[in-house]
Amino acid sequence: MKRVFYRLHRGTALVFGLAALVVVATGTVSIFEHELDAWARRGARSVRVTSSPNFSFDRAIVEAAGTQGVEYFDTINVFQRGQEPATVRLGVKASKDQFVVAQVDPMTGRLIEPTSEDHVSPAGSLADFFVSLHVRLLVPGNFGLLVTGFVAFGLLFLLATGILFHRPSPSRLRRFRRTGSTRTQVGQLHALLGSWSLPFTGVTAVTGAFLSFATTVLVPVIALVAFGGDQEELVKTVLGPIEIEEKEGIAKVDTLVTDALSRHPEAEFKAVALEDWGGPQAQASVVLEAHGALDHQRHRLIYDGHDGRFLAEPPELGAKPSLGNTAFELTRGLHFGTLFGTLTQFLWLVFGIATTGLVMSGLTVPALRDKEADGWRRLAAGLASGGLLMAFAATGWTWAVGLGLGLNPGPALPWAFIAGALAGGIPAVQRPVLTAVKNAAFAGGLAILTLPLGNLWATKTRLSSDLSETIAVDAGMIGFGLLVAVASQFFLTQRGPRHTEPALA
Amino acid sequence: MRQRSQAHEETRSRGYVAGCLVAAFFFSLIVVAGATQWFPSGAAGIDHIVLPALSFPLVWLGFAIGLLAAQRRGRAWGTAVLIVVLSSGAMAAGLSGVGT
């Protein structure tokens, strides 16, 4: 039976391994999306919509609606992602043509032209690229979510079969012998990292699969069975319906956002969603978030859309506390690493690196077995190790050079990632795998180590008063790059005979 | 001749693994959709929707490992099909509006 699990584990790794590696590695970087975004601007923060004297939610909606006017919209969303301008999205179900997306400069309160929903500023394109790669693997729309959902299933299956044939035990948490061939040592590293990162990998794979499949598969299927196919009714039930009295008038959005912030002064504005705006059931939901060192709070405040009266502050899901809501909040907190604020973010970074090392070492072991190491296995090992590091380095440097030259580097980043991966991975097909990985890891490490210089040049050493996040990310890159460059020279050296250990240790 | 039979066996085995994984996906969707009909809805009236949906990845894993690792394949498939038939019954009740 152990042999069956081993073969299932190895076969699944061949199909899903590289995609899982990219999802895990970019997910690890995405934990610090906001910090990376702040680093990309060297701390020069854009104005928050709620602190700008020139920004008005009501005026932004009127300007976005343009000649259509704001008499009626089924949904209106206004939100501000990180350091980007505010986005206003207005929709009317009956007419697809009346779906409008506009971006508003928080500083001036005026529309930015030209614009689209997925418009990201050149500086913000680096963090946005890693998040998009993690969520959709460069595949557009809902199909991308399906792909990452299946990758999460692949990772989950790898984990389950790995447990069944490795049989983790407390002794495995410290088992690492410095003797034996390189393949044996990489294999031991794989088992060691797998044992330490087991709960993290399992939790992120389960929660990630749910998040990917929720809107693409689960909502349509559950709506079909329980709500006669009406997905809106399902969403309304899950969010918890709030009764609104029918009356005249349209509330001022500025007033209710100010009221929400006064109820939670420690929190920041995230988004406001207006439903049936101008209609009999008009209501507004204001979402605020407070991120601390040890906790993360999210608040949803509901207002009457006619007179702006505060109605309720229900949980994230449902009108009152429930097991379903607790489980959902736990799922989200665990996946995004916000469960206990900054503390879990750092823990997730460490475990994320461990899981990346787990997948990396798992894909490298087969290439170190001479008898089985065909060209594809060697390429997979090269792409998974040196290739991944080169991909990150090439993406970072392409972003820096593009920004420094005054271009928008966003469209070039996917190509830079692929080119970096191939440049680091292909040499492993022709040369001894370890030598190729050692060279690519050294080059990738050096490129990451020097990336803060590229950032300084690209942002023209523009400095702001708040440099804490920038310095932290600079230090992280220098430390990580140095570690990789030095470790590649010391540890990636062929040791011992290659066939001293059986396939299953 | 022996090599050809080994290769044939490997292809069959890969096909069986892929079949089990795909079947597990559809089985788990049916179980989750069916569970929305019998799972308690809780105080806020959402538990019957949210909790089965959240457990979808684990239900899939349970089916996948159960079908692939079973010593007696017939019994494993029989149990899986029984669960799916029961869930389909609950699903059909939901689709036809029984109990709503």
Image (spheres, helix red, strand yellow):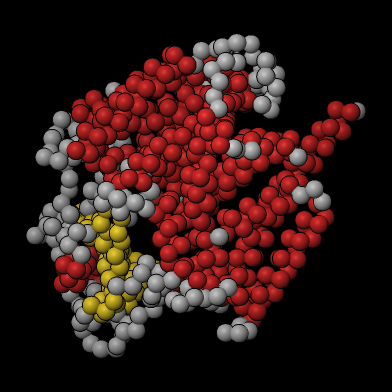
**In the depicted structure, whether residue B20 falls above or below residue A243:** above
Quadrant assignment, res A490: top left
Q: Residue at x 64, y 60 (%)?
A: B28
Q: Is residue A55 left or right of residue A439?
A: left
**In the depicted structure, whether residue B6 falls above or below residue A341:** above
Question: In the displayed image of the protein, which residue is found farthest to the right?
Answer: B1
Q: Position of residue A174 (x, y in %)?
A: 52, 29
Q: Residue at x 68, y 49 (%)?
A: B65
Q: Position of residue B60 (x, y in %)?
A: 63, 55
- Does the image show residue A226? yes
Please state which of residues B66 and B21 is positioned toward the viewer in this rendering. B66
Q: Position of residue A230 (x, y in %)?
A: 50, 75
Please state which of residues B96 and A101 is positioned toward the viewer in this rendering. B96
Please state which of residues A125 and A190 is positioned toward the viewer in this rendering. A190
Quadrant assignment, res B26: bottom right
Please state which of residues B76 and A237 is positioned toward the viewer in this rendering. B76
Q: Residue at x 39, y 31 (%)?
A: A392
**In the depicted structure, whether residue A227 falls above or below residue A342:** below
Quarter of the figure with the N terminus of chain A: top right
**In the depicted structure, whether residue A353 falls above or below residue A432:** below
Question: In the displayed image of the protein, which residue is found farthest to the left?
Answer: A53
- Does the image show residue B22? no
Q: Position of residue A493 (x, y in %)?
A: 51, 12
